[in-house]
Amino acid sequence: MKDVIIIGAGAVGCTIARELAFTRLDMLVLEKECDVAAGTTGRNSAVVHAGFNNRPGSLMARLCVEGSRGMEALCRELDVPYRKTGKALVAFDEEDMEILRKLKAQGEANGTRGLRLIGKEELERMVPGVGGIGGFYSPETAILDPFKYCIAMAENAAENGAEFRFEEEVTGIRREDGGFTVTTGKGEYRCRVLINSAGLYADKVSAMAGVNDYHIYPCRGEYFILDEVAEELLQMPVYPALKAGIGGLGVHLTPTVHGNIIVGPSAEYIDEADDYACTPPVMDKLWQEAQALLPTLKRRYVIGNYSGIRAKLAPENEGGYRDFVIREEEDCPGLINLVGIESPGLTASRPIALMVREMVGQRLPLVKKENAVRTHRFPPVFAKLAREEQERLIREDPEYGEIVCRCRRVTKAEIRQAIENPLGARSLSAVKYRAWATTGRCNGGYCLNRIVDMLVREYGMRPEEVTLRGPGSEMFSGEVK
Amino acid sequence: MERCDVLVLGAGPGGLAAAAAAKKAGAERAVLIDRDVRAGGILNQCIHDGFGLIRYGASISGPEYAAKALAEAEAAGVTLRLGLQAVSMTAQRTLLAQGKDGLVEFQAGSIVLATGCRERTRGAISVPGSRPAGIFTAGVLQNFVNVRNILCGKRVVILGSGDIGLIMARRLTLEGAHVEAVLEVMKEPGGLARNISQCLYDFGIPLYTSHTVSNIIGKRKLEAVEVSPVDDAMRPIPGRAWTVPCDALVLSVGLIPENEVALTAGVAVDEKGRGALTDEYLMTNLPGVFACGNCRKVMDLADYVSNQGTLAGENAAHFVQGEPLRTWNDRESSGMVKGLPAPGSVTCPICPNGCQIVIDPETGAVSGNRCPRGLSFAEQERIRPMRTLTTTLRVEGGPVPLVSVRSDRAIPRDDLQEAARRLKACCVRPPIRLGDCLAELEAGGVTVRMLAGEDVL
């Protein structure tokens, strides 16, 4: 019998796992995909929000501001790429300025620091080439690498004793005296406290435990990924003033910690929680809106598309946001539900985890684990190192001299470390998100073959076993002959 | 800091020719670097024949062509540095490269860029739909199939009619996959007429011009693509789509000159085509930095790339010596016939002109040929079309899983698939030398020898 089972290894589930792994609780994380960060965590704008978007008094507002304040130190502790860029919102007319004035007042009520309205000139200085008559500046907004954030949380949790099981989709939950029995495709697991952090499927998981109070409305956002032009074109995220609409933040431009720009997201309610398609009408509209915001954008900068899905509690006809649900269910003692964790869930993930930790503490003793490790380190990122460091690494391990991913200058040593990751995730995406190979302008045109070759010839996989994102996403049919 | 007179980036056909020419033109030290551990670049995965028509007067495979070009460079005394990836360069002609032995800095009297091109991707053209496993660019797949012995799938749709896509349509067919269709969004196919004819028509593979993939279906693994006709603005026409089940989608939608290293030094590139801009001496905006081949402007034939490399290498050496430079004429490399073969014609493969020969069935009168050499080919096409078979054989116990082979003479076209199928069972062991006979095959009454296209030691 486990003390705690967490369902879902997204940013929130993994952060909870890390916090609880500092205690002596025996813990298991169940994830239906083959790796962490496979859902909404890995499919968003990667922004650390400063907290002015949310209604004062809401959990969203409070946890977002807390999360934002602690994020820099947390990322340092976990070796996660983070950059405090600030963020600009652009007004195109007086109506927009009025919206921004209200937003500033809302942010101040929430405790967001440093917000101020800016004139056309200052806006132009901050974001050269941007359209608009003026705007609003938030100095506390930041960007981070959401994959590494989630991976670091999970690896740190695992190092401190949390057990992760992948490709285990929960299919049933039985309530029993003093706990739960959770059934997956592969086995049965028992626990005292069950934490439902299943993101887009949190309503279904809750219902399996007998709590039918929720309905999640998947709301898709599509994105463009642009080449590494951020340094030249965009130093901070730029958002439009948001006129009333369904709950999103409007199509915005965001630089990434890797130097790309992402454009999006749209907001469209869809039927299936795993329909990650990109659609021509939305892509066309996205591009138009992005160009209205920043006319210097060129179509040839586009190197990819993706989409993410928001786990919304507010249905389409209601619009806007409903607050996070984070509670132990009265009707189902021991079940801690996290439902409707959409934006700003990534920013708020640590305060959410601390809240959940308190709830767990009501049921189980939280005894501090001796010798728990709080810090986490990733293998070095070769391309980011000074030349002397690079030379030293190549001397120590000649595989650092061998570039596998040309666009990102990722070396064979880094690919190897990504393949041999501590969580044991073995797919091309697992390598991609850790080593950041295949993410450049050639979309893997050079490195994909080399990575597959390593998996086949050095790790003994058969070609038909190589997957893009776990079982069901096999890349190849087998050998030619 | 390593010093050299001429430094050449990229050991594909352009770079090999440039380095050899620089040496022949009197450069004291000509260094050729390449990121791969084997010289030849993309030629090594192009196991089909059709290379060498200009340079060597014969139709040979990519690996064979690479071997000849390499032998010429070695004979000329080129210093070959393989496994070295260029990272950045400066306008003062210094270059930083990286390999297993560490970081290396070069100072060159002149530099020749021969960095080739990369493929346009799905990401760049925003093909709509989901992002499942099973989508490849044609060159990536060519590498998997011809070099690494990995097959993408059994039912394939090809988007784009660029030459690599056409070549892969034939390769996949010969390896037992079924190519459902080739789709081209433009009104005319982009590849060479000889490839349309010998890669698609020979195998009855349908080509749909003015069509595109309007949706990709399959959440984790590709299940099907939705195919739509397009209007004059190349937009899918609503309501006329149909679905083609498939497990692989291959993109052959264009090539982009690869100038990432050149850009670090400020080499000017064409805003639209992304090729390095040069003057008539093949020199870029940076004095002493030359460019040739696909990184300058994507070319139709490796032979043209080699010719241009030769001139760039020679000029690079003369630049260092202060000698006058020679000029390049772009017309020398644009003779190929592209698009759909003329109706009822035979596309002559004997030289790069690709003449569209028509023989009047009534009178026997021949037209369309610019020289008499294609006549017997055209006659043969009428009676019994004959083709060279190029494929791979499985290598057991070697450093690589496959070796490329070419038949020493043509076999009847209609026996190609069966012959390739029979060769699948064949397995060879190293050492293998280029030109070794690795198998004998009787096809349609013709006995052919399958000759190794490369060394496997």
Image: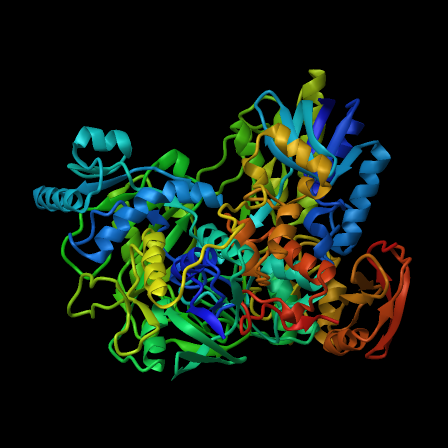
Its colouring scheme is rainbow
**What residue do we see at 79% from left, 22% from top?**
B28
Q: Nearer the viewer, residue A40 or A74?
A: A74
**What residue do we see at 40% from left, 40% from top?**
A73
Q: Is residue A125 left or right of residue A46?
A: left
Q: Nearer the viewer, residue A313 or B294?
A: A313
Q: In the image, residue A439 lies at what x, y percent?
A: 51, 51
Q: Is residue A350 left or right of residue A383?
A: left
Q: Is residue A63 left or right of residue B339?
A: left
Quarter of the image for the C terminus of chain B: give it: bottom right
Quarter of the image for the N terminus of chain B: give it: top right
Q: In the image, residue A231 lies at what x, y percent?
A: 40, 35
Q: In the image, residue B256 lies at what x, y percent?
A: 53, 47
Q: Nearer the viewer, residue A445 or B380?
A: A445
Question: Is residue A219 visible from the viewing direction of this image?
Answer: yes
Q: Residue furthest top?
A: B322
**What residue do we see at 32% from left, 69% from top?**
A337
Residue B407 lies in what quarter of the image?
bottom right
Q: How many marks?
A: 0
Question: Is residue A81 visible from the viewing direction of this image?
Answer: no
**What residue do we see at 18% from left, 47% from top?**
A110
Depicted B126 relative to depicted A67: above or below: below
Q: Nearer the viewer, residue A429 or A418?
A: A418
Q: In the image, residue A393 lies at what x, y percent?
A: 67, 36
